[in-house]
Amino acid sequence: MIRMLVILTSTLALLCVGADEKDDVMDYIDRHEAEYGEVAKTIWDYAELGYLETRSSALLQSKLTEAGFEVSVGVAGIPTAFVASYGEGEPVIGLLAEFDALPGISQSASPIREILDDKPNGHACGHHLFGAGSTAAAVAVKYWMQANDVKGTIRLYGTPAEEGGSGKVYMVRAGLFTDADTVLHWHPSNRNAANPATSLANKSARFKFKGVSSHAASAPDRGRSALDAVEAMNYMVNMMREHVPQETRIHYVITKGGEAPNVVPDLAEVYYYVRHPSAEELLRIWDRVITVSRAAAMGTGTQVEVETMHGNHSLLPNEALAQVMHQNLTRVGGYTYSEEEQEFAKTIDQSFGQEKSYLGLEAKVLPLELAHGKGSTDVGDVSWVVPTTGLRTATWVPGTSAHSWQAIAAGATSIGIKGMQVAAKTLALTAMDLFNDSELISEAEEELRERRGEDFQYKALFGDRTPPLNYRLP
């Protein structure tokens, strides 16, 4: 039976890494705060999009190489993906590191909205902190292993293009996680929590309609509008919303719609995301969307081409690992704002225009409970093949939403770095416990098998497509 969400004293009693050793590792991370804070700020400034993170990836690789890790670059057919390892043998404890930015959202490090004309992209999801913090944790664990003659392998996975590119899915499909015993991850947030979490499975595609151009006034009968097809598809999908399970999420943007009103567009494109907690249900809904696209093409005398862009499984929670992560996050604790940070946070808080303020959550650790996320992540695919758990820390002003200018702003300040330090310490301490406790790893593996079911066979939701390395290019 899958465990209830309670702290099991018998299990936690086995986590006997000495307090002095854990204090030493936390001190090590504190001593290197400026170093990894600079790494994070540099990647923030690069703001490179998915599969184009050449400088960001190289920076993390260089820090790991300097620390004595062996780094394999260009894995899974992705130039910016890498795997960095230290040690040998079992257990193999993995850490995930992301570093891609988001397009079309710009902001300085100011608490007031300030678009930067020369920087169209931004780290609105904090992946610059994610990559730097995980790297700091991996190096700190290596320091502990070396100092205490600990056997096993600490491994950091450099994972590009989480934002709609499914970089980790290609790495899973390539077998890069096959020999890992557990995987740990984290994500920037507006609060501190290490809850076992679910997410929505997700699939996306570009629907490219091809028609016939013509003069829209003098010869409209000769034209077949690709834009009409896009609009027809969108209308039918929006009607379909009434007839899908309520947990479903569907969203789209029209990426091409024509150039001039007096020319019947012969090319138009719409980019769709579809999400649902169950991958099986997601695929059924997806088939209906595909059918709608064909109907739209038929009804407008056009042709449609569907290019699947990405697909992610839902997160599979692992409570055995989450309890240990929560224990270590509680040990690390939150943090307090300086006077300057308080003023910054108050200004950000006022920008939300909401009556309730969440300021103060940065100093707290939320209780352990199962969290049902509405977003999607390619960490989900990792969690179906190896026991996986993660945490979130307050790198943003409490109340901040991901993918916002407020997230970009705080992520470039000491607020972001303080939250990153909380994450790095928690990841490192949790990895130490896993190296020390083979029974915990076995328990996590048993929970994974039970949650997946006996007949589970992993299959990537995007099929056999190759990585869309240019998906962020115009």
Image: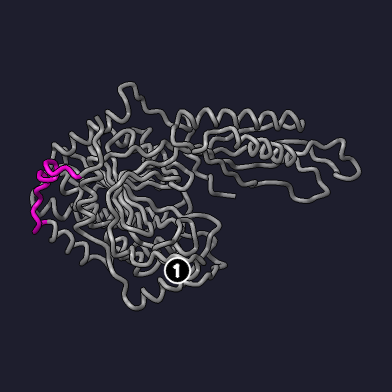
Q: Residue at the location (41% across, 47% down)?
A: 160
Query: Is residue 57 covered in magenta?
Result: no
The quadrant holding residue 89 is top left
Q: Which residue is mark 1?
A: 349
Q: Is residue 239 left or right of residue 412?
A: right
Question: Is 201 rendered above or below residue 110?
Answer: above
Query: In the rendered image, is residue 462 in sight?
Result: yes
Q: Is residue 281 left or right of residue 318?
A: right
Q: How many circles with numbers are drawn on the protein?
A: 1
Q: Looking at this rendering, what residue extends furthest in the bottom direction?
A: 339
Q: Residue at the location (41% across, 38% down)?
A: 77
Of the 4 image quadrants, the one containing the N terminus is top left
Q: Amino acid at mark 1?
A: Asp
Which percent across, then down, holds residue 269?
66, 42
The quadrant holding residue 229 is top right
Which percent across, then down, holds residue 196?
31, 44
The quadrant holding residue 381 is top left
Question: Is 382 rendered above or below residue 423?
Answer: above
Q: Is residue 263 left or right of residue 447?
A: right
Query: Is residue 11 covered in magenta?
Result: yes
Q: Looking at this rendering, what residue extends furthest in the front direction?
A: 355
Question: Is 331 rendered above or below residue 275?
Answer: below
Q: Residue at the location (42% across, 43% down)?
A: 377
Q: Residue at the location (32% across, 47% down)?
A: 96
Q: Describe the element under mark 1 as helix, strand or loop.
A: helix
The residue stretch that appears in magenta: 7-21
Which percent across, then down, holds residue 252?
60, 44
Which percent across, then down, holds residue 311?
47, 36
Query: In the rendered image, is residue 76 in sight?
Result: no
Q: Looking at this rendering, what residue extends furthest in the top direction?
A: 455
Say which of 5 and 53 sits in front: 5
